[in-house]
Image: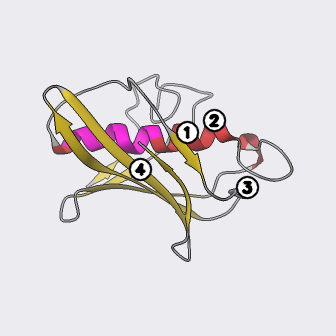
Amino acid sequence: MRLDPNPTNPCFGCGGANARGMHLAFEQDDARQRIVGRFRLGTEYEGGSGYLHGGIIAVLLDEAMGKACRFHGEHAVTADLRVEFIRPIRVNQEIVVEGFVGRREGRQLYHQGEIRDAAGDLLARGQ
């Protein structure tokens, strides 16, 4: 199932109502229980020297992990975000972002996310 930006949602990452937002679209892979996005982000998201800004990498992971709440049928907000930057991600590089359920402890949901290049090499991960 495709998860397009909601035209009334002002969210910077996934909303359609934010003119300056990223308008990120994902796929919900029910068989693998994964949220998947495929992107090539341009120079407007650059940090230094042709690479994506670390904050943008965090946004990508946060959006994918947040959407993994759909597998619980719940809504949640991020309480703690940890990002491990493994390799720099080039501007305009093809990347695959995935979010998935890690575990649940009572009301607390712990999700995980990964960003990989087209060859499948891990570039960043979050929890």
Query: Which residue is under mark 3?
Result: 91
Secondary structure beneath label 1: helix
Query: Residue 17: percent from the left, percent from the top?
Result: 48, 25
Q: Can residue 67 be found in the magenta stretch? A: yes
Percent position of residue 78, x then y: 38, 26
Residue in the image at 73% along x and 55% along y: 91
- Measured in 3D between alpha carbons, the distance from the residue under mark 4 to the one under mark 2, in whole angstroms, is 15 Å
Asked if disc 1 and disc 2 are in contact, CB closer than 8 Å, the reply is yes
Amino acid type, callout 1: Ala
Q: Is residue 55 above or below residue 30?
A: above
Q: Which residue is mark 1?
A: 58
| Dot label at residue 45 | none
Judge whether 23 appears above or below 120 on screen: above
Looking at the image, which is closer to me, 19 or 41? 41
Q: Are marks 1 and 3 in contact (CB under 8 Å)?
A: no
Q: Looking at this rendering, what residue extends furthest in the front direction?
A: 105
Kindly report which numbered mark, 1 or 3, lies closer to the viewer in this rendering: 1
Lower position in the chain sequence, tag 3 or tag 4: 3
Among all residues in the image, which is located at the extreme bottom? Answer: 119
Residue linked to disc 4: 113
Q: Residues within 10 Å of mark 2 (few under 14, many from 20)?
A: few
Which quarter of the figure is the C terminus placed in?
top left
Q: Of the residues tagged 3 and 2, which is closer to the observer?
A: 2
Mark 1 and mark 3: Cα distance apart in space: 15 Å
Dominant secondary structure of the magenta stretch? helix
**Which quadrant holds residue 58?**
top right
Q: Residue 19: percent from the left, percent from the top?
A: 59, 27
Q: Which residue is mark 2?
A: 55
Q: Quadrant of the N terminus?
A: bottom left
Q: Determine the image quadrant of residue 36.
A: bottom left
